[in-house]
Image (spheres, helix red, strand yellow):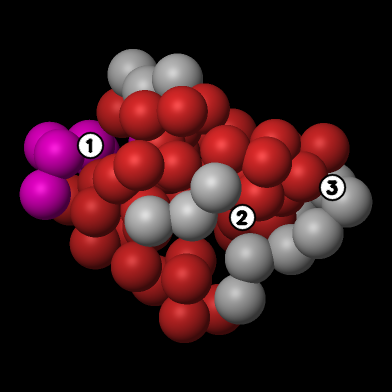
């Protein structure tokens, strides 16, 4: 689930992996691993990304809507 969230957040912000890594203060390799599902971001980091998206003007409904589809 984290991989889709990270990929969607990055896409909605219009960021490359390098730019997203810079904005979130992690390495590009970490972003790549999250998006490939090799590692998962922590819950605190997911909240940080949500806040970052809000600052970037991203509509949160577009970001988290898929998390609640069962």
Quarter holding residue 2: bottom right
Residue drawn at the location 47% of the way across and 71% of the way down: 45
Q: Residues within 10 Å of mark 2 (few under 14, many from 20)?
A: few
Residue drawn at the location 35% of the way across and 42% of the way down: 22
Quarter holding residue 11: top left
Residue at disc 1, secondary structure: loop
Res. 61 visible in picture: no
Q: Residue 17 appears at what percent x and percent y?
A: 52, 27
Where does label 3 land, which residue?
37
Q: Where the C terminus falls, by quadrant?
A: bottom right
Q: Is residue 58 magenta?
A: yes
Q: Tag on residue 67?
A: 2
Q: Tag on residue 58?
A: 1
Q: In the rendered view, does 9 fall on the left or right side of 67?
A: left
Residue 2 versus residue 33: which sits nearer the camera?
Answer: 33
| Mark nearer the viewer, 3 or 1 | 3
| Mark nearer the viewer, 2 or 1 | 1
Region rendered in magenta: 55-62
Residue at disc 3, secondary structure: loop
Which is more N-terminal, label 3 or label 2?
Answer: 3
Residue at disc 2, secondary structure: helix
Residue drawn at the location 74% of the way across and 63% of the way down: 40
Furthest residue to the right?
Answer: 38
Quarter holding residue 15: top left
């Amino acid at each position: 689930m984290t991989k889709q969230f990270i990929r969607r957040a990055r896409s909605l912000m219009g960021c490359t992996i390098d730019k997203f890594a810079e904005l979130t203060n992690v390495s590009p390799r970490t972003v790549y691993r999250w998006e490939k599902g090799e590692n998962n971001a922590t819950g605190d980091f997911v909240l940080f990304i949500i806040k970052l998206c809000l600052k970037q003007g991203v509509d949160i409904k577009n970001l988290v809507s898929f998390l609640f589809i069962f």
